[in-house]
Amino acid sequence: MSPKPNLVFVPGSWHGPECYSKVVALLEPQGFNSAIQGFTSASAKGRVVGMVYMATGFNPAGVKMSFLGGLGGKPPPLWKMNEETGFAEIVVDSREMFYNNLPEDEGNALVAKLRKQSLASLTEASELAYAGWMDVPVWYLATVQDKGLPVEAQRMFVQMAKDAGGDVTLEEADSSHSVMLSKPKETAEFIVRAVAAFEGKKE
């Protein structure tokens, strides 16, 4: 039996690697090797066989644009730019924004772990030289109860990626923005199905 592919998790804005701890704990007993910061020092040969997206967008290659530029140049009503500190500040209830279907105590504990988000990462324009989602299959898990990135926007992102030629499979979870925390079992099962599909297409 061939070894299972390595899984590399990338945290989103305001979050650290601990946000994936529940999912990783469910996947590792199944033989998956998980990493948060990648395998940059690994010498073994390999390649990306697929990508899993959760409640996020797709960056096109060859277009010089900032995250804020993709929003029309103005921050959404969820956060504001603090030029003095150099950070983006959430101006709504963070628990409602990220963890609205988690128990209140757990949500509050997670809010206390949120990190600062640099304005530069949101406002400085850069050109993506390569869009991996155009070369490998993508499985996308949309979050129906999301109050940070409405599910309607997520569905639109998926359709735009498909229209651009991406191979995208969409599933939806009845979850807040942080599906890996509120629905860890469903998220882990989604990843396992995605990997099986990726491995099938690789062959």
Image: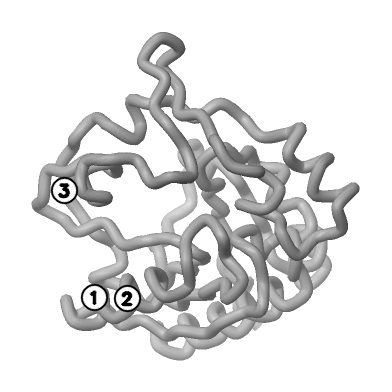
Residue in the foreground of this view, choosing between 34 and 178: 178
Residue labelled with disc 2: 156
Measuring 61% from the left and 52% from the top, which residue is drawn there? Answer: 97
Q: Is 23 located above or below residue 173 in the figure?
A: above
Q: Which residue is mark 1?
A: 160
Asked if labels 2 and 1 touch by Cβ distance under 8 angstroms, the answer is yes
Where residue 189 sits in the image (x, y, percent)? 70, 80
Please, what secondary structure does the residue beneath circle 3 have? loop
Q: Is residue 53 left or right of residue 160?
A: right
Asked which secondary structure carries label 2, the reply is: helix
Q: Residue at x 70, y 72 (%)?
A: 188
- Viewer-nearest of discs 3 and 2: 2
Local crowd at mark 1 within 10 Å, few (<14), some, or many (≥20)?
Answer: some
The residue located at (87%, 58%) in the rendering is 103
Type of amino acid at the residue the image marks with label 3? Ala
Q: Quadrant of the C terminus?
A: bottom left
Tag 3 residue: 129
